[in-house]
């Protein structure tokens, strides 16, 4: 059925272009908004420059990394060059570079628009909640549209040109390696600045969060952008591409009479993007409305539109299967449920946050113990949700034919990620309004304006919890399907070599078990290294801030301007320096396990990695959000309010939670994807060269 | 070869009796030591009474629990009674009760001797290090000898009488359920008292750790005994029985010409006990010697003796295999290596503890972040060690014949646990000398005596880290072999029903995967519930302490005696109340997964449980030890010493670490064993009644 496939390529390009045009429209709309306050213009320019400095350096380092990887790919992937596969290897390199480039472009433009919107949102808040919400949301939505548009465009283009799903793994790996830099690097940057700013400003000097006397304040605002906009965008670009890639790799190994596998993957991705466009276009808040509700209701609109559109497509297109639709729907619904349970554990109107705030009254040790405990407990609903979703989608698609069971899981991931355009928009809204709040304060805007900015910011935090739960859930399902993709790839290699195919990975096999235990320890080590990186880097920045306060006369009194750029520089250097070893540990462990235990050990390794990675990512993200909101709850006047012993304890919890939720937790996703793709790409090497 | 088997039963009983007699000798020797200081006699009686109160209540509750479980077993296990298996079911009940009873007796006597030794050790310290060490060590060794003697005796007796290894699972389950009560309940008790005593004493009033004015001080000392002596003893009784049981269950399903499987299991267990007796008998420290070295060198003596004796037995007994000897040796050596890496992460003469102390200078958030990070990193060497040990022992024994590979892993666990008598002695030494230190202070003994007691205490802490790493490693291998035992049991059921046997558990099967994800979340939830239990209970006790200080005139000035018993009562009630729900969650989840997904889901469930359980247990135990020692390092005068900001931060780290290392971390072991045994016992039910 090649005609139909071409039609869907065409539709993919078309939808992507529509998304780009809509993003352009939103960009121009945001740009048209007026920004007049001189201080806001000045500071937002500083933030923009800081973000660009970081992105430029990051992309340079990434370029170097990509060059080395390209050379390696050229020589050995998908097959060693001496086995006469030059053309495939060149295709793989190009595909890899396209993956990094597209993600990088989406990130770069997203940052540009976000740093354009923050000041405009602050000034719009002078006119009221309604306008300010729209500016902030649309600024974030540009990123959402670009990410999904680029990923759909890229996947379709690579598959159309290369004609081979194996080459798509290269594209996905490109997206992953960029995400590793953007998410982990950005995460270290943002928390370095946040922690150092809080420690020196709030704790030592007792000044407000966004006080312009603090040398780290601009770095802190830059961090929101590079970590939460660019980093998160790259992360979801990666997840989205990985979900589509694994579905397509598995689809290419399937055959059942009358089922259009590949077409369904593209069709659902297209419809997800259309649903997101509709959701973004309809997002509004009334004059005295609730921004949290507005964000959530646009998510529900997107979900409903997606479900209806996919149901219609399944009903009317010949060769689309209701069973596969069921899998995709299961994924999406479970994604929402995971988001809602995350909300339960991190929302300050619900009991858990209040319990942690209550524990803070007994001292910081109890803040930590209770937050850690509820963080661990909060991982269970999501794990169970993923488990059930995998089981249902497997059982739904199993009757279609051999191999369809795993395809069902892959489509479940595609379904969960279908509304990713909307998710990113909601997520990128957060840092824009967070910055806007800071700018409103620094620009000396009215009390009422700051209150509005606060309200917008608080909605951003609430929604973030949901989207984070959602994206971890999606990553969970995606990597299960990547495990399926790894098996499909390996079997292709084994079949070509005339060897026995792998039927599965038996945990009673010692090589599998060996892989599982080592794979399980990697996310723990990886996240620990990132957290220690933040610690070390924050220590450097605190020293620099002390130096500035000691050596710049009049700084404490507000009569001199601090050297903001020095702090940005420290955060940038440190982030890139600390991220490399953590990434290398994960990649080298994969190669070691593969060369020692072969394909079966890698199967176990990936499983262990997924299981402990999911557990730790959920734990860290939720515990971090929980501490953050319980601090805010205390600051709202509960348990003695600001300045009380409970508040001090809650601040310590928040500081611990910061690198959990914004550095380590979300980077684990990327680590899992990177490792899974390295494994799939190297499958032929492991088959040929392993010790056992 | 029944004659040889009977010989080994006989030898098992004989060795157990020798161990009992040696324990009796040590008990009488300790009892003979003089204790004359009136205050020490008074306080150590209070500790003894407190410990007995707790044990009595615990055993009553356990009795009730055992009664319910017995009723259930009688009706449905190993097969439902209506399938005509009355005799087997009665045997199973008796075996289960014997398991609980033997472990309970060992715990009870161990506590008795430990509480007898503490005061005598304190007074012996007046005469010098050499004497005090011997009293403390021998007091602990009674427990070590009893535990290993009872487990060997029990296993041999049950197997001899019942003649069926399935019945042995009941014995092992009895030991496990006691361990759950003793370890988790004791862990909650000890940390409730410790945390409450520290918070009110050290933090609020600024009085010393063992100041008799603190109403929680006796409860704290009682806690050391019930948590670290009775709890730890029950835990290792459980591990040791589980290791032997799984090896024997697997052995019974094996047949290779000329190999004496069952005999080797008993022979190695016997030789391990003999080696421990020799190690215990030779433990000495010179007049100015180093007690840490003395403890470690007796461990090495035991190891060497065991290796030589097992090599001799393998060489001279017909039907013993060198491959199996290799597996056992691998386990033992890896156990030592895990212990040593644990030491690296928790010893204050090594860099990690110092780094955490350094981080404390930047505030408590950094104490927590760095301790958490190194805790996570520290899990890797042990995970890799277990992985390698499993791989090697599997590969070593695979050539012997079908099923021997898993038997190799089981023997690796038996090997690792062979020196458990020595391990328990070293571990029980800790609380005895810890108590002795407190008694020396309360009894107003000389400065020099307190210094000696301090030195003995510090050696106890260092050795504890090693033994803890060791016991987690052993539990890891044991549960892998329990997984093998589960498969053997299930296949027996399947064979009897004429169904297809299980060949393994494929992670690409959705039911297996479903089980894995849910199994992995259980240790997180279980440990979180225990920690929250400690929090809640400590809060109650702090309230009680405040009440006493407010309402008893002259208490703060030391002119009145606090109501120690009230605090003991709170710790006891709370411990038992908080432990039940955590245990039930684990057991109910096992049954749910089994009835939903059947045997394959349970296979996955056990694997997920093992993997995340090992990771979290290692993390929590090591992070806790690390914080404890970095606090002590700061207290020794580093980073500003006592009272500095770094010290305050380090104390917060220690408080967080307390329930990690003494409640949740070590209880996870027991949780895994309980769940594995429930699964094995219910295998026939799962096969008959599961949904999928």
Image (cartoon, coloured by chain):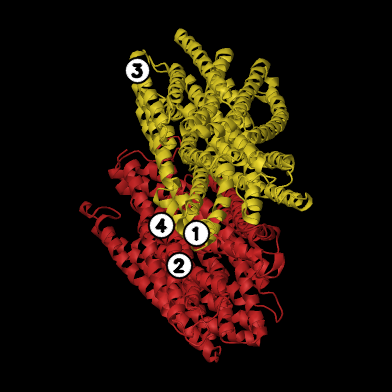
Chain colours: A yellow, B red
Q: CA distance from mark 1 to mark 2?
A: 14 Å
Residue that mark 4 sits on:
B674
* In this view, the mark in front (3 or 4): 3
Q: Chain of mark 2?
A: B
Residue B240's x, y, as percent? Answer: 48, 62
> SS of the residue at dot 2?
helix
| Labels 2 and 4 positioned on one and the same chain | yes
Residue B662's x, y, as percent? Answer: 51, 64
Q: Which comes sooner in the sequence, label 2 or label 4?
A: 2
| Labels 3 and 4 positioned on one and the same chain | no
Q: CA distance from mark 2 to mark 4?
A: 27 Å
A354 over A515 or under it: above or below: below
Q: Chain of mark 3?
A: A
Q: CA distance from mark 2 to mark 3?
A: 59 Å
**Contact between labelled residues 2 and 1, with CB atoms less than 8 Å apart:** no
Residue that mark 1 sits on:
A360
Q: Could you say which is closer to the camera, residue A481 or residue A240?
A: A240
Residue that mark 2 sits on:
B538
Residue that mark 3 sits on:
A312
Residue B317's x, y, as percent? Answer: 54, 61
Q: Chain of mark 4?
A: B
* In this view, the mark in front (1 or 4): 1
Q: Chain of mark 1?
A: A
- Residue A431: numbered disc: none
Residue A67's x, y, as percent? Answer: 72, 26
Q: Which comes sooner in the sequence, label 1 or label 3?
A: 3
**Contact between labelled residues 3 and 1, with CB atoms less than 8 Å apart:** no
Q: Quadrant of the N terminus of chain A?
A: top left
Q: Quadrant of the C terminus of chain A?
A: top right
């Amino acid at each position: 059925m090649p005609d139909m496939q071409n039609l869907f390529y065409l539709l993919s390009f078309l939808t992507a272009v529509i998304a780009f045009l809509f993003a352009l429209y939103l960009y121009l709309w945001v740009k048209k908004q007026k920004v007049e306050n001189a201080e806001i213009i000045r500071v937002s320019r500083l933030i923009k420059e800081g973000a660009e400095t970081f992105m430029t350096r990051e992309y340079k380092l990434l370029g170097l990394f990509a060059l080395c990887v390209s050379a390696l790919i050229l020589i050995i992937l998908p097959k060693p060059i001496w086995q006469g596969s030059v053309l495939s290897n060149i295709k793989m390199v190009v595909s890899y570079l396209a993956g990094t480039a597209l993600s990088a472009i989406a990130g770069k433009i997203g940052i540009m628009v976000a740093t354009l919107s923050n000041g405009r949102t602050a000034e719009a808040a002078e006119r009221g909640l309604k306008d300010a919400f729209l500016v902030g949301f649309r600024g974030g939505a540009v990123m959402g549209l670009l990410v999904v548009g680029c990923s759909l465009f890229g996947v379709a283009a690579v598959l159309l040109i290369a004609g081979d799903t194996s080459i798509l793994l290269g594209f996905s790996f490109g997206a992953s390696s960029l995400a590793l830099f953007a998410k982990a690097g950005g995460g270290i940057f943002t928390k370095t600045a946040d922690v150092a700013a809080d420690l020196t400003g709030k704790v030592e000097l007792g000044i407000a969060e966004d006080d312009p006397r603090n040398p780290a304040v601009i770095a802190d605002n830059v961090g929101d952008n590079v970590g939460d906009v660019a980093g998160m965008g790259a992360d979801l670009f990666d997840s989205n591409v990985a979900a589509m890639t694994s579905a397509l790799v598995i689809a290419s190994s399937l055959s059942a009479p009358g089922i259009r596998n590949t077409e369904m993957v593209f069709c659902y991705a297209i419809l997800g993007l259309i649903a997101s466009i509709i959701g973004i276009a309809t997002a509004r808040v009334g004059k005295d409305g609730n921004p949290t509700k507005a964000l959530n209701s646009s998510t529900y609109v997107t979900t409903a539109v997606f479900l209806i559109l996919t149901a219609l497509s399944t009903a009317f297109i010949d060769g689309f299967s209701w069973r596969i639709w069921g899998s995709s729907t299961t994924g999406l619904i479970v994604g929402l449920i995971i988001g809602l349970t995350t909300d339960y554990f991190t929302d300050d109107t619900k009991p858990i946050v209040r319990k942690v705030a209550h524990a803070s009254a007994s001292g910081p040790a109890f803040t930590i113990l209770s937050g850690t405990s509820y963080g661990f407990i909060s991982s269970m609903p999501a794990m169970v949700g993923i488990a059930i979703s995998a089981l249902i989608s497997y059982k739904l698609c199993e009757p279609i034919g051999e191999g369809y069971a795993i395809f069902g899981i892959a489509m479940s991931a595609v379904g969960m990620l279908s509304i990713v355009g909307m998710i990113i928009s909601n997520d990128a809204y957060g840092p824009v309004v967070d910055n806007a709040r800071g700018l409103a304060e620094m620009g000396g805007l009215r009390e009422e304006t700051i209150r509005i900015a606060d309200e917008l910011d608080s909605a951003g935090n609430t929604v973030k919890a949901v989207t984070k739960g959602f994206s971890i859930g999606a990553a969970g399902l995606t990597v299960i399907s990547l495990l399926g993709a790894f098996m499909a790839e390996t079997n292709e290699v084994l079949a070509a070599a005339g060897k026995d195919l792998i039927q599965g990975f038996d945990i009673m096999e010692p090589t599998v078990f060996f892989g599982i235990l080592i794979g399980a320890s990697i996310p723990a080590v990886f996240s620990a290294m990132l957290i220690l990186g933040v610690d070390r880097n924050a220590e450097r920045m605190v020293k620099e801030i002390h130096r500035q306060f000691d050596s710049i006369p009049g700084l404490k009194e507000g009569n001199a301007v601090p050297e903001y750029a020095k702090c940005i520089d420290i955060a940038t250097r440190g982030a890139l320096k600390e991220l490399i070893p953590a990434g290398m540990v994960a990649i080298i462990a994969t190669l070691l396990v593969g060369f020692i235990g072969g394909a079966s050990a890698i199967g176990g390794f990936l499983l262990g990695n997924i299981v402990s990675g999911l557990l730790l990512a959920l734990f860290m993200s939720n515990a971090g959000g929980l501490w953050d909101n319980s601090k805010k709850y205390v600051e709202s006047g509960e348990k003695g309010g600001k300045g009380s012993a409970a508040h001090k304890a809650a601040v310590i919890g928040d500081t611990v939670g910061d690198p959990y939720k914004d550095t380590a937790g979300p980077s684990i996703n990327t680590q899992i994807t990177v490792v899974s793709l390295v494994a799939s790409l190297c499958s032929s090497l492991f088959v040929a060269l392993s010790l056992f």
